[in-house]
Image (cartoon, rainbow, N blue to C red):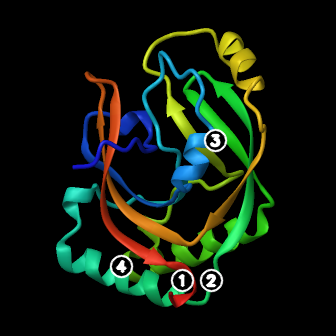
Amino acid sequence: MSDQPNETSREHAGRRGGTGHSNCGPTPEINRSWRTSRSPASRAAGFITVDQITDAVGAGISPAARDALVEELGKRLADVEPFDIMIGSLESYATGVIADLHPDDQLAALHRAVREAIRTVRGDDAVRYPWGLQHLTISYAREEASSDDAQRILRRVRPSHAPLHVTEVQLVDVTADSTAKTITWERLATVPLGGQ
């Protein structure tokens, strides 16, 4: 089990495999460039939720169904070339720290390809995750803290923007533990963009 944080809705807290996710994440170089004071937030590697599987928790999806999803993702993502987006600025929210992403067009195209793969394998009930303006999640808050104080710290992070080269999507199984106040994921598969 990895200790990488991941995004899940609060109603799924405490459930093993709260949602299936397709994520793309920054390189270690990007992670190093975004180090900030995260206390009292959880440690994070940063990730982008491209989509979530909404019809079953991770444990409710059989290995054969996962294999079929990975195969379909491979077919769909072979036509999506790796691309660059800009990360930043960092923003403090009640739930943690995020970074804006732009431009939106290639990330939106990646989302559509992932969503169609999920729909093809699992049906319409599996693609009900509301998708809007995307962001890179840096960390989640574990305790109450002043978001104004956090934002003052984040505003001093330089550079305030950084490029991210997106080359893959990861299928992950999420675990949220409301007692420990952690969100972790287990990487199930990595699917390259552009048929690499």
Q: Is residue 139 left or right of residue 123?
A: right
Q: Residue at x 19, y 57 (%)?
A: 59
Q: Which residue is mark 2?
A: 80
Mark 4 falls on what kind of element? helix
Kind of element beneath mark 2:
loop
Q: Earlier in the sequence, mark 4 or mark 3?
A: 3
Note whether 99 is above or below 23 in the view shown: above
Q: Secondary structure at mark 1?
A: helix
The disc placed on residue 33 is 3
Mark 4–mark 3 Cα distance, whole angstroms, equals 34 Å
Q: How far apart, in angstroms, are the residues tagged by discs 1 and 4?
A: 12 Å
Of the two numbered discs 2 and 4 on the same chain, state the one appearing first in sequence. Answer: 4
Q: Residue at x 63, y 41 (%)?
A: 33
User: Three-letter amino acid code at disc 1?
Assistant: Leu
Q: Amino acid at mark 4?
A: Leu
Residue at image mark 4: 69
Mark 1 to mark 2 CA distance (whole Å) = 5 Å
Q: Is residue 171 left or right of residue 64?
A: right
**Residue sitting nearer the eye, 6 or 57:** 6
